[in-house]
Amino acid sequence: MLHSDLAHSTQDCEACPIRHRAVCARCDADELQVLEGIKYYRSFEAGQTVVWAGDRMDFVGSVVSGVATLTQTMEDGRTQMVGLLLPSDFVGRPGRDGAAYDVVATTNLVICCFRKKPFEQLMETTPHIAQRLLQMTLDELDAAREWMLVLGRKTAREKIASLLAIVARRDATLNLLTPNGKLVFDLPMTREAMSDYLGLTLETVSRQMSALKRDGVIVLEGTRHITVPDFSRLLEEAGDDSDGGMLS
Amino acid sequence: MLHSDLAHSTQDCEACPIRHRAVCARCDADELQVLEGIKYYRSFEAGQTVVWAGDRMDFVGSVVSGVATLTQTMEDGRTQMVGLLLPSDFVGRPGRDGAAYDVVATTNLVICCFRKKPFEQLMETTPHIAQRLLQMTLDELDAAREWMLVLGRKTAREKIASLLAIVARRDATLNLLTPNGKLVFDLPMTREAMSDYLGLTLETVSRQMSALKRDGVIVLEGTRHITVPDFSRLLEEAGDDSDGGMLS
DNA sequence: CGCGACCTTGATCCCGGTCAAGAACTGTGG
DNA sequence: CCACAGTTCTTGACCGGGATCAAGGTCGCG
């Protein structure tokens, strides 16, 4: 293979970086072949909108790389993020024509799309896909409920710490390094996106980030690059005790 | 049939009041018969806890009658309701041993329980069940995301109006009457439960209920019996415009 | 009647929102 | 290299909605 553009280099499902975590995780070789027949890749630049709420959406798919957000907006402009889509997460809803939320790429983004109609048919004939999608949907429901606690009952400082913990944890499971006992990662979002996620204003986000920095809970390099010297301390600040055994 | 206790009178799935909305909705007669083999009814009094978060849960099931809540609690006692289970809603998570949340009966409650192990096996062999469960889970995810907007961005008054609208709508679809243009229903929860749902204190709930009453948005008879003279007005107060065409 | 659960209302406080200014960083063109 | 503009982030001053603290009211039940 002479050229190495992403679309080409990931056309083979077996070599796909999200092969074992996405909706296709349980498929066997035969099933993958069928999926390959209805799939195509789409790329988006940071800031681009993938679909607008209410628009017809003729595909579903998986985030291959990058980060996208699901956002709901009220008529007067108040917005609330309701989902954060990281690599391997599923986009779209089988059995529904219109998108329920705005989907926006917050970094450069690649989606592995399946044409919706054939995908829906496939779901009926391929239990492995439906089973995996059910499992992923249940996980998302748990995540959404976790988030309801954050939104409804946590203070601004706890909200920020919770978000940092989630991003750190999700990054750490797949990507990132733990030099000694520290945890280093980049926030994939602006302060404004954080505020939309947390039900705060961007000023409050900024103030609480400064406060966590001042108190030594995090170390900031620039505005996005974060070092967490002590993860359990961060979890304490988030109001979540018990680190769930991660990082042993 | 001489005696008419609920357990007996609903043992026949065909006659079940939630037959067409629950997880068994798509099952045919054969499949129902298998389900009948692993099902049993359990009743709970108002206030009783069905399971505690973290406890082992050896069944899944459907709410047949009554109302239950899913609640999350922080170590310091702050609580957030993360789900409201009405008749036909599914309880429990296949593929997981422990309950993730406290499940509490807020009224007298009857659950149609399926032993978990056999149910899980059934899900693999009976696509109708897995398909229906996926659909229901997707609907719950949408509801949870809707609720995230309420928790994150709405004012206390809008939160109350949103809750009333949801209860009114869910009741209206199956149970309730619309004499002329009005809508009448009973709140299946205390002020405290409302506050747990909405991320407020019970004092704020009480004040805003009084304010909505004073402003003629609702009419109260006692503390639970509610008349909504103009549903679109209620939706306006909730910050949700467009009544979605319901009540034509 | 008296007790306990549930609800309402008032007085006060404070966290986070709002409004406003300016700093830091990025990219663009001269 | 600097000047400039645009975007993103920080910080300060002030305000207000909802939390907190505290009484008191209503209802149902033994």
Image (tube, coloured by chain):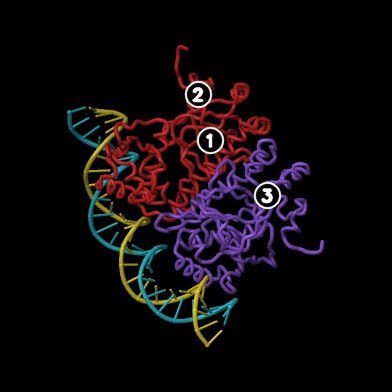
Chain colours: A red, B purple, C yellow, D cyan
Q: Secondary structure at mark 3?
A: loop
Q: Dot 2: few (<14), some (14–19), or many (≥20) neighbours within 10 Å?
A: few
The x, y position of residue A32, in whole percent, is 59, 24
Identified by mark 3, the residue type is Ala
Mark sitting on residue B22? 3
Residue labelled with disc 1: A90
Q: Secondary structure at mark 2?
A: loop
Q: Nearer the viewer, mark 3 or mark 1?
A: 3
Mark sitting on residue B95? none
**Quarter of the figure that contains the C terminus of chain B:** bottom right
Q: Is residue A221 left or right of residue B170?
A: left
Task: Write down the chain letter for disc 1.
Answer: A
Identified by mark 1, the residue type is Phe
Q: Dot 1: few (<14), some (14–19), or many (≥20) neighbours within 10 Å?
A: many
Q: Secondary structure at mark 1?
A: strand
Residue labelled with disc 2: A16
The x, y position of residue C13, in whole percent, is 30, 67
| N-term-proximal mark, 1 vs 2 | 2
